[in-house]
Amino acid sequence: MAQGSRKQLGDRGEALVAAWLQQQGWRIVAQQWHCRWGELDIVARSPAPEESLAFVEVKTRRQRSLDQGGRLAITLQKQQKLWRAAQQFLTEHPEASELPCRFDVAFVAQGKVSGALMTQTIDAQPPLALVEYIENAFQLE
């Protein structure tokens, strides 16, 4: 798959997850936030009264991917990069640094999936389905 189409698929997946989070009452604070450690796909703030911040890693795959729908891509090294990026984000956004934080992972698949949390079809592109959303998917100390 060409790099451009892979990025387009990933962007569509992130947009789907952001829309789903907003339906759940979350506010999107940042998307595709970059720093020297990498990219945070989505940073979202939960609704009051018990506000928290979620750093959401989105894995979007075509059907029959070789990495179990993106699950094998969440390596310890990837987790450490996300943790460093989250620390940098909090340094640059001190107003959010007092909130409880967590790392969530969202798995999105191209195509129709029964039992999906949310499905989205745009124009003539194949549909995308939010297959699974894992809160507190990992923690690093």
Image (cartoon, rainbow, N blue to C red):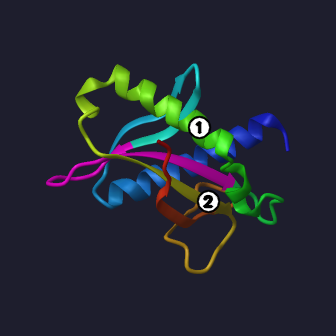
| Quadrant including the N terminus | top right
Q: Quadrant of residue 67?
A: bottom right
Label 1: how many Cα within 10 Å (few below 14, some 14–19, many 20+): some
- In the drawing, does residue 30 fall left or right of residue 115? left
Q: Where does label 1 land, which residue?
A: 80
Which residue corresponds to the image point at 58% horizontal and 61% vertical from the top-left? 121
Give the residues in magenta: 44-60
Task: Determine whether label 1 and label 2 are within 8 Å by CB.
Answer: no
Q: Is residue 59 magenta?
A: yes
101, above or below 122, in the image: above
Q: In the rendered image, is residue 44 in sight?
A: yes
- In the drawing, does residue 40 fall left or right of residue 47? right
Decide which of 112, 136 is in the foreground and name it. Answer: 136
Label 2: how many Cα within 10 Å (few below 14, some 14–19, many 20+): many
- Whole-percent x and y of residue 35? 53, 21
112, above or below 30, in the image: below
Task: Residue 108: give its label.
Answer: 2
Say how many tags the image has.
2
Q: Quadrant of residue 96?
A: top left
Type of the residue with mark 1: Gln
Decide which of 124, 93 is in the foreground and name it. Answer: 93
Type of the residue with mark 2: Val
- In the drawing, does residue 58 fall left or right of residue 111? left
- Whole-percent x and y of residue 110? 69, 61
Q: Earlier in the sequence, mark 1 or mark 2?
A: 1
Q: Is residue 30 magenta?
A: no
- Whole-percent x and y of residue 54? 39, 47
- Whole-percent x and y of residue 23? 34, 60
Indicate the secondary structure of the residue bearing disc 1: helix
